[in-house]
Amino acid sequence: MKVLKFGGTSVGSVENLYKVKDILISDDDHKIVVCSAMSGVTDQLVNLIELLQLKDAEAITLHLHRLETKHNDLIDELIDEQTLRNDLKENISSIITEMIDISNQSFSEQISAILVTYGETLLTYIFSNYLTHIGVENILLDAKDFMHVDNVDTPNIKKVSSKLSEIITSKQSKIYITQGFVCRDHLGAVSTLKRGGSDYTATIIGAAIEAIEVQIWTDIDGLHNNDPRYVENTHPISHLTYNEAAELAYFGAKILHPQTVSPVVGKDIPVLLKNTFDPEAKGTVISNKTYKKGLKAISAKDKITAIKIKSNRMLMAHGYLKRIFEVFDTYHTSIDMITTSEIAISLTIDNTTNLDKIVKEIEVYAEVTVEPNHSIICIVGESVINDKSSYKLFEILNHIPVRMISYGGSNNNISILVDTKDKLSTLRFLNRKLFQTSTETVL
Ligand code: ADP
Ligand code: ASP
Ligand code: MG
């Protein structure tokens, strides 16, 4: 069995859904198909939740009706039979009424999680019915019946596996359609896998059913060597190892949710990144095989805060670092980069929820400086430091205002921290110097 995931753009219009349908019927394999919400819909739901907090009843109703119209328009274009069209619209209307009822309850995190997942519910309902209408046999599965994720870092693969195999055994079909993004937490409450989480849904399902592969279909021909939204002359990378892909995803390559790779590592299930609009393009294969060592790609992660901890007393003495790390641990704040000297430590975090408390505790025994608005630029590739072009990095660094640099945590990555205002120029400069002047490093 294979898992295929289609992102927001791929399911964002009738023309695109026709392309998805063509991909689904292009072979006879058994498939679980994970769909995102139509592009823009989850953003609209996030706005809706903000309106709920503001208790703006008029804007909420308007918002929900706009959502209903968008999905009704999709039904009008997809379904050519009047009776079915009316039935589907009636059910969409009931789903919207359900959302209005939920919106009227007093606001909580749980209400917010439930509402934000409705984009996937609406789209999969319509798409599954469309497929049935044109004779493509499929069964719609509610992801809330099997997607158990204790917290966002810990999917309960065993539970997903047993629930899913129970469901699949009782409802046999070649194609199953389900929603990405939504899950249940350890208490069984509805939760989400965070923005972009449908990629993660796909690999969790892939691991749970021991799929032969997971295909992630999106609007670009694979993972590029640099962010194509900001940098010209990028190219797709044909092969990446799990480790390389995990570093790139964690450090900002938007094409993949940060946790996408983790469920399938160790299971030897390849993840293919494919283009819905150019299915023949090779895309990127992520697996445990190393086809070529050396420099592969650059990504960038924003909203990074740098923290400098300075003390002329014993900073590097036995036990001192432990005390500092314990403070971050107490507040569940993970550290991305770290460098040390005899009298100071510089480190970075991306979650600043408890920053004030952390600073207060450390200030008892050290001087703390906080610098927000930084970006980590991550240069990735197995044994990247040995790459022929990496020697140029040291020369290049002369031209980049680097705040921190880190290498050695793994052989796969060199990370540099820059002020976010310098991020784009740094990405472009690195692209020119590391990739365009040395074609032999380009895979
Ligand atoms: P989907 O909705 O299908 O999940 P996303 O918008 O989440 O798609 O991811 C695809 C987008 O990621 C691409 O359109 C591209 O602009 C962006 N992107 C950012 N960095 C990269 C990269 N290194 N390689 C490919 N795409 C990237
Ligand atoms: N619809 C969700 C989002 O926009 C999940 C996803 O598309 O992967 O974040
Ligand atoms: Mg995505």
Image (cartoon, rainbow, N blue to C red):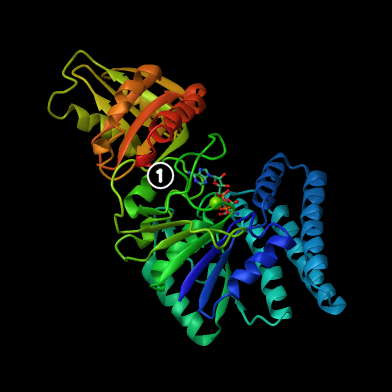
| The quarter of the displayed image where residue 171 is located | bottom right
Q: Residue furthest left?
A: 318
Residue 11 position within the rendered picture, expressed as x and y whole percent measured from the top left: 66, 60
In-image side of 242 versus 171 (left or right): left
In-image side of 141 versus 354 (left or right): right
**Front residue of 162 and 441:** 441
In-image side of 201 versus 408 (left or right): right
| The quarter of the displayed image where residue 91 is located | bottom right
From this view, report whether residue 92 is shown above or below residue 199.
below
Q: Which residue is mark 1?
A: 248
From this view, report whether residue 314 is shown above or below residue 79.
above
- Respond yes or no on whether mark 1 lies under 8 Å from ligand 1: yes
| The quarter of the displayed image where residue 412 is located | top left
Residue type, label 1: Leu
**Front residue of 124 and 293:** 293
Structural crowding at the residue carrying mark 1, measured as other residues with C-alpha within 10 Å and reported as few (<14), some (14–19) or many (≥20): many
Report the residue at 63% width, 82% height from top: 137
Report the residue at 36% width, 36% height from top: 379
From this view, report whether residue 292 is shown above or below residue 68.
above
Residue 129 position within the rendered picture, expressed as x and y whole percent measured from the top left: 71, 75
Residue 230 position within the rendered picture, expressed as x and y whole percent measured from the top left: 55, 34
Quadrant of the frame with the N terminus: bottom left
- Whether residue 331 appears in this view of the structure is no
